[in-house]
Image (cartoon, grey):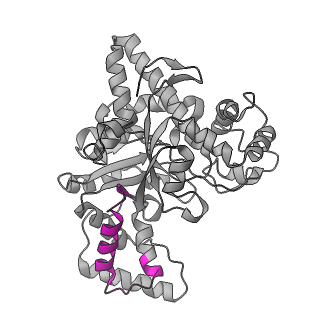
Amino acid sequence: MSTDLQADASGPGALHGLPLFDHHCHGVTTAALDRPSFEDLITESDWAAPDGTTHFDTQVGFAIRRHCAPVLGLEPFASPDEYLARRRELGTEASERLLRATGISDYGIETGHRGDEILDPAGMAAAGAARAHEIVRLERLAEELMIGECSPQAFRAAYGRVLDERLESAIGVKSIAAYRIGLDFDPARPADGEVDAAIGAWAAHIADGAPVRLDDPVIIRHVLWAAVDRACAIQFHIGYGDADVDLHRCSPLLLTEFLRRTRESGARVLLLHCYPFQREAGYLAQVFPHVYFDVGLAINYTGSRSVEVIAETLELAPFHKILFSSDAFGVAELYHLGALLFRRGLEQVLETFAERDGWPSEERQRIAELIAWRNALRAYRLDAAMPETERP
């Protein structure tokens, strides 16, 4: 597929024809959304906007009206009510239009978050006319075992068995340790006895009526090391997220000792989102051979300022360590904006390098391809498995 760096007429600043491997995202909903439901899906806040205000008055809200409205047949900056009326009129076609206009060739679908409300990987592949690959959430896998009343004595063996089964088709795993225990956890592998005792305590809490929610640091360390032992591609939530996260405990620098201990394991560590720690993530990607990162999620929510965020990712990090993701969830608009703003921002940054230091166009194109999809193929070990004719 062509990766000509000329601007695409459908999106100013876009890298025309550049395919994208969205290595971390979620499915979209097929529900007909009213305005409150839609606004809930375009913010990381779990609160409605204050009375008399709207989540459309944000960078992402303005970007939807500017860039998504024309895809649905409206003028740029149609009002929020006009936009949502048109969206309901089109039904599922609205999501299909937005997804198929992204140029995303591959989705890495993380299935552990509200999976019953959104399309699964197969549904996303059909809606977006793209390939879809599953990413397994480590903590959710443990929770599913406990919902199935796995005994504390059988948990470690059962977890390893189920993880192996899921990895027969999934391309990687994800941890939300940042949400549950912070990234300042003890990086050492826990002893088997510690894990068994922690599972016993968790089972007792569940029996007493507590929700099945994994937030025990010993068990989370165990599932992380289970993934390391399998030389997985391991995604970590980093930085920016909803109100459940303690942002000061989500700097990727807190993972430094864990990264030291795992750098020869064969596992790859993929730092997701990273805002406002994108420079710290770039440093880690430079000094550790198995670390990759992206600024997905931040691209959507910084909108017109996303160019600067993208530029900061290219300061220290090797170009072969940077990935693309949208982290889109629920609404296809976030996929569309993630792709459009990423292409536009990357092109503008590379053009700035050319203006300052004469970077040749063929080199800019090569770097764009690395970040857009080639790095993801290598990080997830799909480069050998995917024939050249089937690549983006």
In magenta segment, residue 221: no
Q: Pick the residue in front: 212 or 216.
A: 212
Q: Quadrant of residue 169?
A: bottom left
| 293 shown above or below 168 | above
Q: Give the total of numbered labels.
A: 0
| 282 shown above or below 242 | above
Q: Pick the residue in front: 263 or 69.
A: 69
Name the residue at 44% across, 33% down: 19
Name the residue at 54% across, 63% down: 115
Q: Can the viewer see residue 98 in this picture?
A: yes
In the rendered view, does 126 fall on the left or right side of 18?
right
Q: Can the viewer see residue 284 in this picture?
A: no
Quadrant (top left, top right, bottom left, bottom right) of the C terminus: top left
| 195 shown above or below 125 | below
In the rendered view, does 215 fall on the left or right side of 10?
left
In magenta segment, residue 151: yes
Q: Residue 339: horizontal and vertical position, in percent?
A: 52, 35
Name the residue at 22% across, 56% down: 262
Q: Residue 265: horizontal and vertical position, in percent?
A: 19, 56
Q: In which quarter of the image is residue 5?
A: top left
In the rendered view, does 348 fall on the left or right side of 264?
right
Q: Quadrant of residue 93?
A: top right
Q: Residue 76: horizontal and vertical position, in percent?
A: 72, 28
**Magenta span:** 145-173
Q: Residue 192: horizontal and vertical position, in percent?
A: 24, 78
Quadrant (top left, top right, bottom left, bottom right) of the N terminus: top left
Name the residue at 72% across, 48% down: 91
